[in-house]
Image (tube, helix red, strand yellow):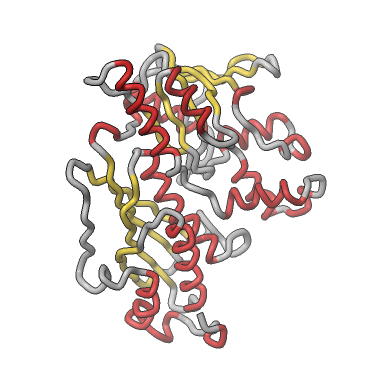
Amino acid sequence: MNSDLSCLQVKDIGEQGLLERLQRFCPPDVIGDDAAVLTTNPNQSLVVTTDMLVNGVHFSDVTTSPEDAGWRAAAANLSDLAAMGAFPLGITVGLGLPGDVSVNWVERLYQGMTECLQKYHVPIVGGDIVRSPITTLAITAFGEATPDFIIRRSAAQIGDAIVVTGIHGASRAGLELLLHPEIGQNIKTEEKAALITAHQRPNPRLDVIPILRAILKSQSKIQNPKSKIAVAGMDSSDGLADAVLQICRASRVGAVLEYSQITIPKAFEKWLTAEQGREYTLYGGEDFELVLCLPQDTAETLVKQLSTGAAIIGTITPGLTVLLHDQEQKLRDQILTLNQGFKHFTK
């Protein structure tokens, strides 16, 4: 990117000029026709997801650089593929822009997307650009999964263990530190940096999928080669509590969560009350971890093979109620509902 052209605006070069610049972020043998052609392997299912990000809702210049906005946009879509047990093939990008947005900002946005995608060898294979009164980013991601290993929300069974793949609440804490730097005075520099990174550059848990597949394949051979072990799950982009509730609703089961088993950032105790920490952990959102429901022995094996933060945090139960139990605080069991946490169309 040429710094001498940093003041150039989208309206100065028009749609075709901008497209020409953005095509450098795409494989040359894919871009140029009316649609991309992606080759999938035999006996695979195509998995498709779309996610939208709007300036002022999902990102802002106050807390997010263009590169970080691009990274987060890509990560959100790759996380949805991971939640289905799929490996990514490519993404398309729909971009709505005011004419006075700088070309440099757009190129930096694509640079951030590319930095995230390159970790998983995922190309940008197309998209569209339109004029819009507000900057809007809509990404469609394509992945593939074997039909007998697609993770669905509706597959939870009574007695299943509930596994989370990492730490929750860190992204929300990072956002608060960016908005209110003064509240982080008692936090170590490295702890603060880790929380901010969790918000600006989350990592979709695609690394979990091959590990889980290998465990399921191994255990199926031992137990019953003709049957498959069902796994329910989704990602925690809308919060840990929301993920558990959505799985339970789709599977028509209940759950008991043990709050003391959930890994919480150590920095929380330095600047948050216990109630605030619980709010961040359960409802903070945008941690992009996986929440999985699977047999107890499978869950234990998976947690042993995953990184710090992975834990069994509860059990699937009969009925439809989801309870939060906090043995350490000796609080009365709390019923969790979908009415808590962030909602797009409520204040």
> Which residue occupies 46% across, 20% down?
161
Q: Is residue 14 above or below residue 254?
A: below
Would residue 347 be seen by someone viewing this image from the given angle? Answer: no
Q: Is residue 323 left or right of residue 226?
A: right
Q: Is residue 271 left or right of residue 97?
A: right
**Residue 217 spot, x, y in % from top left:** 32, 28
310 or 134: nearer the eye? Answer: 310
> Which residue occupies 37% across, 32% down?
214
Q: How many marks?
A: 0
**Residue 111 spot, x, y in % from top left:** 48, 68
**Residue 88 spot, x, y in % from top left:** 34, 50
Q: Is residue 38 above or below residue 146?
A: below
- Give the residue furthest to the right: 186
Q: In the picture, residue 118 is in which quadrant?
A: bottom left
> Which residue occupies 58% across, 60% down?
64
Q: Is residue 5 left or right of residue 259?
A: left
33 or 62: nearer the eye? Answer: 33
- Give the residue furthest to the left: 42
**Residue 141 spot, x, y in % from top left:** 33, 53
Would residue 159 be seen by someone viewing this image from the given angle? Answer: yes
Q: Is residue 192 above or below residue 4?
A: above
> Which residue occupies 35% across, 77% down?
19
